[in-house]
Image (cartoon, coloured by chain):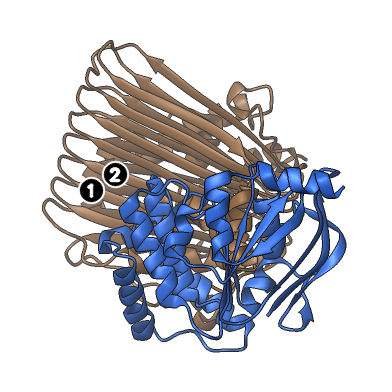
Chain colours: A brown, B blue
Amino acid sequence: MDLKEKLISSFFAFEEQVDLENDVHVLRNKAIEFFELNGFPTKKDEAWKYTSLNKVLKHDYSIFPKREVAIDYKDVRKYCLHEIDTYQIVFVDGVYASHLSSTTHDKFDACLMSSALNNPKYEPLIKKYFNKIAPEDSLVSLNTAFSKEGAFIRVPKSVIAEKPVEILHFSTGNEAAMMLQPRNLIIAEENSHLQIIERHQSLTENPVFTNSVTEMYVEKRAQIDYYKIQNDKENASLIDNTYTEQHNDSICSVHTFSLGGKLTRNNLNFYQKGEHINSVLNGVTILENKQHVDHNTLVHHQQPNCESHQDYKGIFSDQSVGVFNGKVLVDKIAQKTDAFQSNNNILLDDKSSINSKPQLEIFADDVKCSHGCTIGELNDEALYYLKTRGIPEREAKALLMFAFANNVLDGVKLPAVKQRITKQIANKLGVELGFEL
Amino acid sequence: MLQVKNLHASVEGEAILRGINLEIKPGEVHAIMGPNGSGKSTLASVIAGNEDYEVTEGDIIFEKANISELSADERAHKGIFLSFQYPVEIPGVSVTNFIKTSINQIRKARGQEDMPANEMLKKIREKAALLEMDRKFLSRSLNEGFSGGEKKRNEIFQMAMLEPKLAVLDETDSGLDIDALRVVSNGVNKLKSDENATLVITHYQRLLDYIVPDVVHVLIDGRIVKTGDKDLAKVLEEKGYDWIKEELAQQA
């Protein structure tokens, strides 16, 4: 039985775990049908031309964990932002781990999707927001069909979430192979502000396949800053489907740091529904071995006077593969759009590769849109210059790579996150952080 | 301090240096002059350890150790500094952070602890003042968008920070107006001591009015063909290089 068949037949078992009377279940039923009809995407799909899921799909994944595994805080402490005070929503093998978490319903809600789905108090919100911007797509549908758990965050009008929220997914390897399908719903109401850090982390070498869906709503004058840290084990794969709807004068930034994992696909989508919106999509990708990261972005400018900024930096060594497929769509009505997109890459080895495909579809006539894509190597002259100043080859290379990624790192507004990522990159490059940026 | 013995070097198979002999003692300033294409910058690069040049014969001895096989960073650790003719632009690295990294990497290689932050800051301020550099300048990306004069000032600033035993100044006067030339040479002169040495590579005599050499060498076709005192530079300024070439032809 292949994974698709296994998933479809598991749906009946899944139904025993959820409330069939809930309106959401109608969506689940529709979604499993859609998935059954369409299956997993293949390289024949234009959007998946450079990324094959074959190697990921071949494992016999458990769809539900057979039993809960208790893990200690000390085992996962290093993956948490313990330097600063945060709320944490932590899952172990897809199951909420209350002893590792600290949720809130105080000034805002940072809690579980399962409680939001089952608590009548949240019913109007679920009705209004759940599965409204995630499109009918086979991977999204698959996630919707099994949607049950994940993070639910709602910041009410004019509330500034005083602490960032961490969404952490750990997999223990208790199953020989595990598939996870978290579903997040994030709502920032008018004038509110929220910061999120999300991380998927496997604790063993067993294969893990995560198909995550996040819907995010940024209402008038609200702001969300979202940091995705992807630095997983060699046998962990992630498909991150994130959909963002923004309204007048809102700001939303998503920073994606892809530093590890077997295969990572980021489907990151922004829909601008109002005016004077700013959308920021930044990424740093540093890969080695046979790692594969695919950034598939969409910014849909649907109203006038909005901005979007995309800046993706990639450094590839060994046989690693990068894909950047960035689409900017400007509707006819969206005059005075200011859309910027840039994708710069450094290939350190002959066998590494990057497929970069910027797409601009502009139907308005008074806009400022630019895009640029570069593929190069480290500058030998710069390397020599650094060496004459006593900086050894490895450190000099690292310094140049940091310099290359610096403007993206500079956009990280939480110092603790910036420090973490800088450290992780330094570890990856095999240098002690003997330099500052 | 530095002995260059029968040095031959080539780039992409083409011989550029054809047997250079040179000895520089502590406290001395040597100047190397010569027409374009004579191999002046190659000599500077080979002393600094540029791997684009292949040393085919001869040795470079620095403080009694043969450094011919050392990489550029290892030579810097030993106290050799090259001021570039064309300093490289490195966006994303500020002048301050670059120099901090450089100093601490050199200290690390010498088995020393990092320089304490307050000491570093004090030194950066002091040396920036010496080179009449604006504070804002220090937070800019290394050489990015710098004018020719700013780049050279920044080179000598780095030299002042690193306090090398041997400084090789490759065409430091090119692209400098008269004020910048004064500031830069004043910087170099202030750093002079009995323990360090300077090798000035220049096309024009002008710089040598400011940085007065003890010894002047004339480099033609990859060989040092004449050596004299600072007056030799003046003669070259007046008469050019042709008369030396003629002298050589007669000898041959």
Give the residue drawn at x 28%, y 10%.
A365
Relative to B172, say whether B145 is above or below: above
Q: Are marks 1 and 2 in contact (CB under 8 Å)?
A: yes
Q: Secondary structure at mark 1?
A: strand
Q: Position of residue B179 (x, y in %)?
A: 31, 54
Foreground pick, B167 / B231: B231
Residue A166 visible in the current orientation = yes
Q: Position of residue A430 (x, y in %)?
A: 65, 68
In the image, farthest residue toward the bottom = B112
- Quarter containing the N terminus of chain A: top right
Does B223 sit left or right of B207 as displayed? right
Mark 2 surroundings: few (<14), some (14-19) or many (≥20) residues within 10 A: many
- Quarter containing the C terminus of chain A: bottom left
The verdict on a common chain for dots 1 and 2 is yes
Relative to A337, say whether A434 is above or below: below
Q: Secondary structure at mark 2?
A: strand
Foreground pick, A88 / B92: B92
Give the residue drawn at x 50%, y 53%.
B205
Foreground pick, A307 / B4: B4
Q: Position of residue A236 (x, y in %)?
A: 65, 55
Residue A18 visible in the current orientation = no
Mark 1 surroundings: few (<14), some (14-19) or many (≥20) residues within 10 A: many
Residue type at tag 1: Gln
Foreground pick, A67 / A377: A377
Dot 1 corresponds to which residue?
Answer: A223
Circle 2 chain = A
Q: Which mark is residue A252?
A: 2
Q: Position of residue B53 (x, y in %)?
A: 77, 53
Residue type at tag 2: Cys
